Image (cartoon, helix red, strand yellow):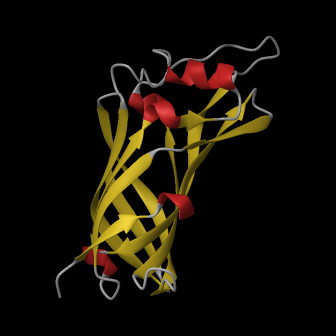
Amino acid sequence: MANDKWTIDPAHSSIEFQVKHMMVSKVKGAFNDFEADVEMDLENLQEAKANFKVKAASVDTRQPQRDNHLKSEDFFDVEKYPDVLFQSKEIIPKGDNEYDVKGDLTIRDVTNTIMFHLTYEGSGKDPNTGKMIAGFEITGKFNRKDFGLNYNAALETGGVLIGDEVKLDIQIEASKQ
């Protein structure tokens, strides 16, 4: 069966991240501007294809000074590299609506293959639009230094200001076109 085209509903979707701060706490944030081209058949999700584009300048940690630093050359360098991209390459069924999604993540013109965990949350008909909708939770982590996001500062007490591991929590609601 052929894959159908699906559109991400930004009002019911989110891309959130967290990074350790000063080795003792976590800073959380989100990207507020993103889109995706998704082709899938809900009965055969391992054949799905997804391409995400995230506007790096939409980073939001609820702290403008930190957001401006993240947009600078120290981190995303949004003037030179406006988009963070993810392209799925392989979807591996793990049982009970659970999948591993292998794909290429590109940040600042550096591309690495990473693995996300995807849970298919179910589907149904939207009573307002009559369209079929489906929900997914995607989690994963990667080392920011693998993408050239190397900025850091040493702490007097030892350790560093910013952790290397970035954890992602993505909630997606998609509607069939």
Q: Residue at x 74, y 39 (%)?
A: 26
Q: Residue at x 43, y 48 (%)?
A: 34
Pick the quarter of the image with the N terminus: bottom left
- On the rendered structure, is 120 left or right of 29? left
Q: In this rendering, is residue 129 above or below 31?
A: below
**Residue reaching furthest left?**
2
- Residue 3 drawn at (x, y percent): 21, 78
- Residue 96 drawn at (x, y percent): 50, 86
Q: Nearer the viewer, residue 75 or 171?
A: 171
Q: Nearer the viewer, residue 111 or 83?
A: 83
- On the rendered structure, is 132 left or right of 47? right
Q: In this rendering, is residue 78 above or below 99?
A: above
Pick the quarter of the image with the C terminus: bottom left
How many labels, in total? Answer: 0
Quadrant in the rendering for residue 148: top left
**Residue reaching furthest front?**
128
- Residue 104 drawn at (x, y percent): 30, 48
Q: In this rendering, is residue 63 above or below 100?
A: above
Q: Nearer the viewer, residue 150 or 39?
A: 39
Q: Residue at x 37, y 19 (%)?
A: 79
Q: In this rendering, is residue 172 above or below 175?
A: above
Q: Residue at x 55, y 55 (%)?
A: 14
**Residue reaching furthest top?**
156
